[in-house]
Amino acid sequence: METAEKILTNAKMPFCPGCGHGVCVRSVSKSLELLGFGPKDVALVSDIGCSGLVDPLFATHTIHGLHGRAPALGVGVALGLDNPNKKVVVIQGDGGATIGLQHILEAARRNIDMTLVVINNLLYGMTGGQMSGLSTNEFKAYKHSDDDAEPYDVVNLAHQSGAAFSVRVNDISNFTNVLKEAISTPGFSLVELSSLCTSHGMKKISEMEDFIVAEETFKNKRPVGVSLKRDTSSLLETIKVLETQFVSTVKDSVGIVIAGSAGGGIQSAATMLAQAGMLSGLHATMKGEYPITVGTGFSVAEVILSKKPINFTGLEKPNVVIAVTDDGWNKVKNRISENSKVYVDSKINTDNLFETKEFLKVGGKKGAILCAIAHWIKASEVFPLEALLKVVEDSKYATALQNAIKSADEL
Amino acid sequence: MKRINYLYTLILKCNTLRNVTSKNVMIDASRIITEAVVQSGADVFIGYPITPSNLFYSYSKERFPEFLAGPDEISVLQWMCGYSAAGKIPVTATAFPGLALMTETLNMAYMMELPMVIIITQRLGPSTGSATTGAQGDLKFIDGIISGGFPLPIFSPSNFSDAWTLSNEAVKTAVKFRTPVIILTSKELVMTQKSFDINSLEPIEKVDTTPKAFEPPYQPYKAGKDMVPTFYPLGNNEYQVRFNSSTHDNEGLIRKGTPESLANTWRLREKLEKRVDEYTFYEIDAEEGAANLIVTWGVTADASRDAVNSIRSKGKKVSLLIVKTLLPISQKIYDIIDSYDTVTFAEENMTGLYKEMIFGKRKNPKVKTATKFASMLTPSEIEEIVN
């Protein structure tokens, strides 16, 4: 940690005459220097608005972002640096705290090691003195604003969200001491400083008293939020290798549509069929189709098994259609062509157009689709049923899956 | 059947002894892209769940050295900017609704010149549309996503091999040019599983992030002839670093309308457009004597490959251009397109969005579009339009 260099540059303060922001900036720099931080130990994150004019004033690292997003940017900087010797200080105004309130709560919830300074002059100074979410009702009445919604207490909100330290300071003479405490507190600290907008608000600090919220201080004893680093292994190492062990009778390609309901294991059964095809020396694809609902509605999968490598994974004319529930049947019945082989559960009403089998009865709700697939494999002899049994043998549900496949014998 | 299997097993064992090196798996492109960006040196995945990018989220949770769940997409990209400014390479994956929320911060990352990779899985819009239906409908939005019409590198894999190599190129380009890079995919491209020999993937080299040499004194936005400033992270002990989202000078301080600050902004366009051939990727399957060209990208490329095979099997000549760096468009792409009498654009959207990038919306007798809305364009549909 450096100690000799100044935190501030010699740049002239860019604020209006009498503006309270200069005091806030000097208090931040003084507190950092008193704590022994040098310029390169500090990453200053600035927001938009009058408080966002501070970059040239600081000799530290600086990053100047978007309106209200500085606390989120600060979270990224703090976690990305992951260095207790570096300090992230974020400065924003009450307007930024309003539009980006979620970012403050998130930083507090995670107790990220950074200090957020909210300079509250009760208004949007740069755009003409409009009211912010932190403007008090007294101030809004003074400014003839019709809005009487209570202001956010950002200090208490940060506390409720889990900030290690959150405080509102109205007394200028205490700014530096409180900032020192905040900056030296591990975890997330928020310091709301009262400021004066001489262009759109009060002309003197003494006039502010009737319009500001009382000071308050909160603390939470919590561990500092970190982002865990871990060693991981390649995603290509953890995937099942499927080398040819069986022989297939498929001469060109076969396209199978498998249909059922969500929760019926349709997608995984289709994957198993494709994998069994691969174990039999075939190229395979598995494309799922389902609504956005999770546990209800149809679930359809298309599997292509082919002697040649497959480019297009869509299935224009299925050779085989397997359906075990009404949901699935209603979704796929229009895709059946005169050349399609159709396998339908006996509970589905097909107007006697197709022969049905009792897949649900013998395979059960979860096993019906594997029962039906096994039935088709046996009937078509595309490859031995052992290929499908082989696919499921190392599953944690191996016994249930094998039983479902073998239940096809009972049909 | 059992006898045939026994003999076949014997043949397979012999093949194994002959050092068969294939490693066949059922895999999807989400897994391949995730692995590729990690092997390329990506440090952290920051995500917010959205269909159909969910597989990226779950694979990244398993694979990335660091994983963070953001509370919303604005936070996700802001956190990524923070990580990037601190010298890390962040990655996220989203779809149009998430990208829409990220847009302001994407502009910030672009202006700050922060390397990062954003994976977009296209789905059917407008708005929330159909989250589980693929599409190729976001290209024009992305083309104009940087205010002022500035270029952003957009990579579009067309198959698993591309998913691997282009993801590596995306990280490389992000670091080399100090820019966000988008990998533009589609639902069926990244969620459909396909048999694939993963041993066919070439090893990936980790991208070197060592700061390059510069002419002193160091200024965070002072660029040399290559138009890309040397990157030092926030918090480094050597040089003061300033990043700035507003128009800024070489030092990184806000300057309105000065020659230096405007040149700095202008440079953002020039570094990517003048050097576009360094990251332009495409595949041309040119048939001698062909007057017709099919132009396609992303998820429609495989259907186009099949259409080309079918057309040629009937004795007709046709060439195929698969564009993999969609934006900015290299002169090389225009030259290829200009060398054919008739061009058919095959895309999974209403009007041919890439076609409109090249030829605009005006009708052109040389140009045809094979398009499909709300489902995959098929090889036969492409063939029909070409013929």
Image (cartoon, coloured by chain):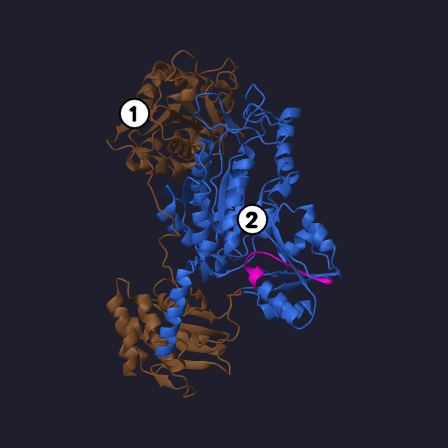
Helix, strand or loop at disc 2? strand
Which quadrant holds the N terminus of chain A? top left
Residue drawn 39% across and 23% down?
A194
* Residue B294 within the segment the image draws in magenta: yes
Q: Nearer the viewer, mark 1 or mark 2?
A: 2
Q: Which residue is mark 2?
A: B155
Q: Name the residue nearer the viewer: A382 or B57.
A: A382
A406 or A101, which is in the foreground? A406
Amino acid type of the residue tagged 2 in the rendering: Phe
Q: Quadrant of residue A351?
A: bottom left
x and y, in percent, of residue B253 in the image: 55, 24
Residue at mark 2: chain:
B
- Residue at the disc numbered 1: A185
Given the image, on which type of amino acid does mark 1 rest?
Thr
Q: Colour of chain A?
A: brown
Q: Secondary structure at mark 1?
A: loop
Q: Which chain is blue?
A: B
Q: Which residues are magenta?
A: B289-302
Residue B178 lies, in percent from the top left, at 54, 35
* Residue B182 vertical position relative to residue B371 in the rendered view, above or below: above
